[in-house]
Image (tube, coloured by chain):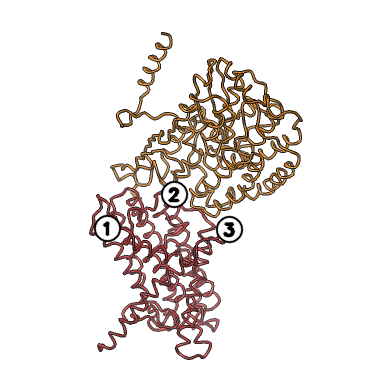
Amino acid sequence: MSGESKKAPYRVPIGPNHPALKEPVMFTFELEGEVVRDVDFAPGQAHRGIEWMGMRRNPVQIVHLTDRICGICGVVHSLSFSLAVEQIAGIEVPERADYIRTIVHEFERIQSHLLWAGVAAHELGFDSLLHLTWRVREEAMDVIENLTGNRVNYGIVQVGGVRRDIVPEQHAIIEKCLATYEGLLDTLLSFFLDDRTIRMRCRDVGVLSRKDALELCTVGPTARASGVNVDLRQDYPYAAYGDLDVKAVLPDRYLGETHGDVYDRIVVRLLEVGQSCQIIRQCLSEMPAGPITAEEKLVKLLATCKKATGEGIGRVEAPRGECLHYVRMEGKDSPASWKVKASSYSNLMSWIPMLRGSQIADIPIIVASIDPCLSCTDRVAIVRDSRRSILSKDDLHRLSVEKTRRLQG
Amino acid sequence: MTPAEIALLAAWCAALSLFALAGGLLLSGIDRKLAAHMQARIGPPIRQPFIDTVKLLQKDTVVPANAIPWLFNAAPVVALVSSVLVLFYIPVGSTMPVLGAYGDLVLVMYLLTVPALALVAGGFASGSPYATVGAQREMVTMIAYEFPLAIVVIGVAWRLGAAGISHPFALQSIAANPVWSVTGPLGLAGVFILLVVLAAITPAELSRIPFDTQEAETELAGGLLVEYSGRNLAMFSLAQAAKTLVLAAIIVAVFFPWTLSSFLAMPPVVALAADLLFFLLKAVLVLFFAVTLVRVAMARFRINELVSFYWVYLSVIGLAGLLLLMADVIAGPLAGVGI
């Protein structure tokens, strides 16, 4: 193609709306022929002011708002927020509730990873695989609907426990779904990993070295695919994970080597589907009897939350990586501060080393490979006089010094 | 030529043009339906391409501010006319090519590049970076598949010539003497290889997965066609449909030219209709194996992979086929078969 001889690199904008992007983000590529020389991106296109809404509600209401932060990770955000509030108010969650939280959480991981696999296949132009994986995904969606009553925005988690129990009749339904997935996993793995065109398009594409992955603080499957052994479920267990046997899925345990490329990210996610099946099975067999919530009466629960003061952090291993909620309560109805850091926030910067030097054709799959969720990530957008501006590191430093001074009085 | 002959020729051309458009849209509809069923979907009705075309023709045509309007508007017309024109030189069913006396397979090869060139011109004239990248890719793709295509055309014609058939490049003689019938066992293998090569070129000519880099929905959002809308886009999609039929017709004419009427005696009118239906059936089969099956079973190639696929692998395979044909000619008289 035009190669090195073509002097002037040309700029191609991709986004905020583009078929390769499932959610809005603005990329500016500097291209030389088909090769990406440099790339810049601007998130903040899907800011909805959810934290602002939350600061005007009480924790019991906010839990249901957190469901709506992300369309895929319904449990992740509500669980993470509840963990933070429970920490502040000193609420002890019954063990059975922890297990139910874990089961729904893992089903969410299954459907999220399968959704991602379908999207990845579509980005590669392999639509048959997209239709296949999404059809398979329906099984998990059906079970989630059976357990929670909803396909998305489950509304199952609440402060102090969960809102629905898993009755013995549902065990059979869950078991049937798990058996289907365990039977299908080998087929899925061979469809994705043995297909020559997928291998050709994904092997050594979008490489993120272990060093970069560590330095950029990447999380979740993106980090694990680069050989970083991080998984909150094993490192800082929450809910029922302390009782369970969870080990981070690393590509070298399956393939014997780590490339840190798109292919490895596929491997990690597909294997995690199998891992989630095992976790759910273990949960079902070990689930203790007992209540499913610490406080059934919402008024009483609200009163407990109202009295609470202090700060809490809820950390949850979302399908995309660590998700963090920071909550600060000062004895009022609504929290004094609530900050959401979604997993994609930690992963976005890894786009830059992955995309540099890649080809245009690889942009969609590389962008999709970290499974970005921008509506989770976008927590701020600066608009002044109906114009958007960007704050540099110096600006941010100045603003935080000012705020500290203000707080000190 | 007398005026009556000219009028007859014009009528034939008009009928063929209609057939090219309608048949092409029908083939696209069948392709979509078959692909949908293979992907466990129901898919759109077979008449969907017709509905889409009618709808597009009613829509506004937008010319981007930084496009070159005359080139931008001329490109779809050129693409459509040239795609339909190719069919005048190719036998359809039992009807011999209407303009067969004025052009042969080599002309068809050249005419086939015109729609692609029109797409490139339209892409560059769009003034959009996506279309520019798409146009560059289309050029590269074209350069990549021309060589294997030439190998196939020359291979078949040369073998027919070696078998003593006059005017081996003329499509009438290619259709009248199926290349399989003049070759020995070695040659059969060679012809089969050339058929595979031509089938592998078809998705690139029609910009279908895995060789649809120039349109690449997820990468370039439609690439070459990204700025086209309304009537202009309808013309491009009609050109695409006509090209689908044309490519199927070429494969059928070169490799599967048999007609029903040559086996079964029937009245001329029935023969015409039966052969036309038989031709469409062959076209559907050819496209199913060359396009539909391939596009549901593969991911999109990168442009550099596409080039190496055509230049290295397919050219080598094509040359191997050509060598087999040559060996067949040498071995033919010795074995007492062939010529």
- Image check: B238 left or right of A325? left
Q: Residue B241, position in %: x, y?
A: 40, 67
- Image check: A249 left or right of B164? right
Q: Which chain does orange denote in the image?
A: A
**Quarter of the view holding residue A383:** top left
Q: For the residues labelled 2 and 1, say whether their Cβ atoms are less than 8 Å apart.
A: no
Q: Secondary structure at mark 3?
A: loop
Residues flagged by tags 2 and 3 on a common chain: yes
Q: Residue A401, position in %: x, y?
A: 39, 14
Task: Tell which circle, 2 or 1, labels the residue nearer the N-terminal end.
Answer: 1
Q: Amino acid at mark 1?
A: Phe
Name the chain under label 2.
B
Q: Secondary structure at mark 1?
A: helix
Query: Which residue is denoted by mark 3 in the rendering?
Result: B40
Q: Residue A22, position in %: x, y?
A: 46, 43
Q: Nearer the viewer, residue B172 or A104?
A: A104
Task: Tell which circle, 3 or 1, labels the residue nearer the N-terminal end.
Answer: 3
Query: Which residue is denoted by mark 2 in the rendering?
Result: B218
Residue in the picture at 47% in, 61% down = B314
Q: Quadrant of the N terminus of chain B?
A: bottom left
Instruction: Tell me the distance, in whole angstroms, between the alpha carbons under discs 2 and 3.
Output: 22 Å
Q: Is residue A334 above or below residue B231?
A: above
**From the viewer's perspective, is the residue at label 3 or at label 1 nearer?**
3
Instruction: Tell me the distance, in whole angstroms, between the alpha carbons under discs 3 and 1.
Output: 39 Å
Name the chain under label 1.
B
